Structure formats: structure tokens, C-alpha cells
Image: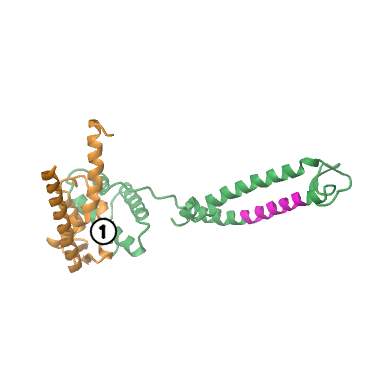
Amino acid sequence: MADKTDKAGVLERWISQARKGYFEMLLLARLQAGRAYGYQIVASLKQVPGFENLAEGTVYPVLTRMKNDGLVTAEWVAEDSGAPRKYYTTTQFGADVLAEMKAIWAAMSAALDAQEVTS
Amino acid sequence: MTDTLTFSTPEARSVWQDFQRRLDWANRDLDAADRADIGAEAATHIRDAMEGLSEGDELSRLQAAIASYGALPAAPPAWRRPVAIITHYGSILALGVVGVFVLIFLHMAVMEVLNAQAVGLWHFASGDWALSYEAQPDANEVLGPWFIPAILSLCALASALLYALWRFAVAPDGPVSGWMKD
């Protein structure tokens, strides 16, 4: 049985699990707003509560997996100012998956609210 | 796409090369193309991160950018894989050779029951020793009735050691098999 002093630890563990759960959804949402390269995506994610201390390198294996799953496409683009950058864009499949994810998210939120009303 | 990051000091180059080794090791489960792509992306990411840092020299900005990238596991030393391969195949050879001896010793234990006067551990007057199926001239059999318990104990000990060796160096889910894939 966790006592009050364990609250921070319990929350930290839950947040860590939850973060993994909606990481891909956040990435898809960011890319649906417009194509972006890795550093831009990381900068956007760091604005999201809970992701302020994101280890920046964790984004790339996830983006690679999403690319292999057909959720995003990636393209190296030569920049005028310097070295080329790899830009990511959502595919139609990725947009459909994001819409489903948002629907599930909304349903979960509604179910949570309903629990609070009935209890 | 190739990595185009260059540094002006040997210290920074060394830190960067260590980072690249760790990154490649961290992504070892990906195929070669994806690993190369992530390596090139990391280079552009570190460059962007360093450009965003206004203070400090090249080395300190590189170290800060790498720290923000996140902790990466240390890559194993370069010698580990070849040593693992030698250990793996050497162990298979040892399992075969020692296994044959265990079978011979078990056979001797059976033969001791059938021919106790001949089978045994013989000690020669010259000081030499011999395990033999036949009685040896000018030699004394030293184990007598203890031959079977002694040789079965030896077989049990050898079998246990062989099993441990198999688990460590040969089994597909053992550590040496894992190191061979590094």
C-alpha cells in the first residue's frame, strides 16, 4: 500500500508510462501542422507539459519506426544556409491514424469525466 | 546521406567519435540503412543544438548538445565480438572432446562391473598413471571398489561444467551468443 510520501514516485511512474503512450500521437499532431525536421520537432515537443526534459535523441528511433509503419515520410532537403536536413511529413495513413487516436483520447477523457460524475 | 560535422580540436573530435560509437551501438537492432540515417540526423541535430548555444567554446557546446540528446549506452570494446566468436566455437570443440571422455568414463564404469580385475586406475612403479580396460603389468590398481563412485563423480562434475559452459558460451540465449551479434 503506497502512503502519501510515495505520491511523487507513483505519479512519476504513471507519467513516464503515459508519455510513452501518447508520444507517437504528439509527433503525428506536430507533423500534421506542417513538415518539420528533427530539431524543430524536439523544440515543439519540449513545449508540451511533461516533455520539458525530453532526451532529444529518443525522437529519432520513434520517427524511424513511424516511417517504416507508413505513418510519415522522410526526405533529405538541401538547405541554402548549410547542411541538408531530413524533413518529416505525415502521410494520409498517418492522418487517419491520428484521427483515430484523437477519437480514442476523447472517448477516454469522456469516460474519465463520467466516472467522476457517478462517483 | 553522410555525416558532415567537423571539429577543430582533437578533444572535440574524440568526444564526437565516442558519441557516434555509442549512437550506433544504441541503434544496433535497426538495419544498416536506418542506422546510417539516424547517425546523419544526429549530426544535423547536434549542429543545430550547438548553433543554439551562444556561450562556451566548441568542446563545451558539443558536450552540452550531446547531454541534451540523452544518455547513450557505452559501446562494447572492439575486441569483444571476435573474442566471443572464438569462445563460442572453442567451447563447441571442448564440449565435443570432453563429452567423448565422459562417455568413455561411463563405459569404463559399466565395464568395471563386468571385469573388475582389469578395469581401473593403474599406478606404475615408474610413477606414471593410466586409466585402462586391461590389467597393467608392473602396476597397481589404486581405486579398487572406489573406482565406480570416483569415475561417476568425475562424470557428474564434468557434465555440470559442460552444461555451465554450454549455457554461457553456446546456448542461443546465452551471453556469448549475444556478444557475437554486437
Taking the magenta stretch, the answer to whether it contains residue A55 is: no
Q: Is residue B104 visible?
A: yes
In the figure, B155 relative to A91: above or below?
above
In this view, the residue farthest toward the left is: A117
Residues rendered magenta in the picture: B94-110
Q: Residue at x 25, y 64 (%)?
A: A67
Q: Residue at x 72, y 45 (%)?
A: B151
Q: Quadrant of the N terminus of chain B?
A: bottom left
Q: Quadrant of the C terminus of chain B?
A: bottom left
In this view, the residue farthest toward the right is: B138
Chain B: drawing colour: green
**Chain painted in orange in the figure:** A
Residue in front for this viewpoint, A61 or B168: B168
Which residue was labeled with disc 1?
Answer: B41
Residue in front for this viewpoint, A85 or B81: B81
B143 lies left or right of A79: right
Q: Residues within 10 Å of mark 1 (few under 14, many from 20)?
A: many
Judging from the image, mark 1 belongs to the subunit labelled B
Q: Position of residue A80 (x, y in %)?
A: 16, 64
Q: Position of residue B156 (x, y in %)?
A: 65, 46
> What amino acid type should be assigned to the residue bearing mark 1?
Glu
Q: Using the rendered view, name the quadrant where residue B60 is placed.
A: top left
Residue in front for this viewpoint, B27 or B59: B27
Q: Residue at x 13, y 55 (%)?
A: A106
